[in-house]
Amino acid sequence: MSADRLTVFDTTLRDGEQAPGFSLRIDEKLKLAHQLTALGVDVIEAGFPIASDADAEAVRMVSTHVHGPVVAALARCNPKDIERAAWALSPAPRRRIHVFLATSDLHLERKLRMTREDCLRAAMAAVRLARQFTDDVQFSAEDATRSDPDFLWRIIEAVIQSGAKTINLPDTVGYSTPDEIKDFFTAIINRVPSSDQVTFSTHCHDDLGLAVANSLAAVTAGVRQVECTINGIGERAGNASLEEIVMATRVREDRLPYRTSINTREIYAASQLLTALTGEGVQANKAIVGRNAFAHEAGIHQDGMLKDRRTYEIMRPEEVGVPQATLVLGKHSGRHAVQRRCEQIGYALERRDLDQVYRAVIAHADREKVVSDRDLAQIVARTLGTTAPAPAAPAPAAPAQDFGATPAEFGYGHGV
Ligand code: KIV
Ligand code: ZN
């Protein structure tokens, strides 16, 4: 049986860019949109054209120059927003107008001062108007997961009848839990009479660190579009991270049998481009794309990696475009990692010499935290009293396949 296909809707350029510190110029958005195309996303949400002239221009530039993915633009449920979105999208060969309106009583009463009936009418009218510009109309019920389920299914049925093709039910404030969101989508899909005529979509925020888990739980309930961003950037704690959702379905295909069109080897390049453009790095321990995601410092782990990389690696770094795994020399490193790295930078050490160098490496790491290749070369020269010049530039780390060849004995750093 072939795996079900998930549509990857990337909102890095809209919801991601909305977050403080992440705003992008038009040329930068275009650059990123080209990389998202190389990555293979199905839909690029390029912006919110009514928000500013620059946002409208960015959507228009992406629509003009980026071919392949559907280009989407966000609009509130009013004619001005929708007409502006339609103008910005008009050069795109494949375009989607994405209209949204809050459906929770909290948002309706306190933020929008609208009744449920006003909301229903505005949503239907917006979808009908958007359909005059394109057949591909998405409706999002903002704060869906905190909305009254009876009202929600009524409005969903109404917008389907008005012409919406995708129904997105965001967990706008990241409040849901995985079992809850699964039940939520299961109930909606069972209850809405015309649910089989549309694609359901999940859009999760990460306020409780559950955005990816919630997105995957929604998929198991029948949702077939996931909305996500590179590096998980987005409002407040961010959105569900594209790379984590995609790699979860790759690595755990046994539990999550879903296909995407993503070329995973472009993931790291997309992550790096985004951090270069915004100047905002990702945390070192960020899954898939963080600096430490494929780094091993602890002696026991390095030993395992040297013997068989599957001991501590569930995916190959090359699969996501990371050049190779690295054995980081630090105070937790073991003798064999030090020996391997010495060999890589051109020093084949006798056992006695290795003992001395190893002790010096650990002492250095206690002071400096990590030991670079340049530090290591200096330690070797100093410890052994040689005049061997330090390499001019750091030597590359071991190619990934080198982890298979293993020294028999192994000594551990004092921290393991
Ligand atoms: O989080 C949210 O509810 C949104 C909608 C506008 C789709 O970003
Ligand atoms: Zn959002």
Image (cartoon, grey):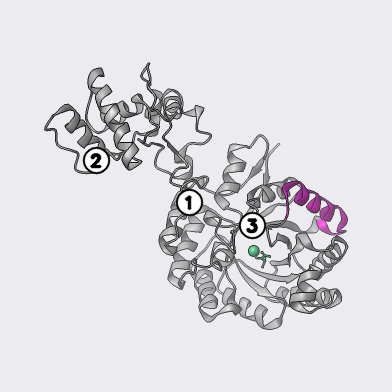
Q: Determine the image quadrant of residue 228.
A: bottom right
Q: According to the image, label 3 marks what residue?
A: 207
The answer to whether residue 192 is magenta is yes
Cα separation between marks 3 and 1: 16 Å
Category of crowding for the residue at label 3, using alpha-carbon neighbours closer than 10 angstroms: few (below 14), some (14–19), many (at least 20): some
Badge 3 vs badge 2, beta-carbon distance below 8 Å:
no
- In the depicted view, which residue is nearer to us: 268 or 213? 213
Where disc 1 sits, the SS reads loop
For residue 403, say whether it is visible. yes
* Main SS, magenta residues: helix
Earlier in the chain: of badge 3 and badge 1, it is 3
Find residue 387 and report its horizontal and vertical position in percent.
Answer: 11, 33
> Amino acid type of disc 3?
Asp
Find residue 30 and report its horizontal and vertical position in percent.
Answer: 46, 67
The quadrant in which the N terminus is found is: top right
> Amino acid type of disc 1?
Gln
Cα separation between marks 2 and 1: 25 Å
- In the depicted view, which residue is nearer to us: 360 or 236? 360
Q: Where 327 falls versus 138 (above or below)?
A: above
Category of crowding for the residue at label 2, using alpha-carbon neighbours closer than 10 angstroms: few (below 14), some (14–19), many (at least 20): some
Q: How many marks?
A: 3
The quadrant in which the C terminus is found is: top left
Q: Where 331 falls versus 190 (above or below)?
A: above
Q: According to the image, label 2 marks what residue?
A: 374
Q: According to the image, label 1 marks what residue?
A: 283
Left or right, 222 with respect to 385, comes to: right
Cα separation between marks 3 and 2: 41 Å
Magenta range: 176-195
Q: Whereabouts is ligand 2, in terms of quadrant?
A: bottom right
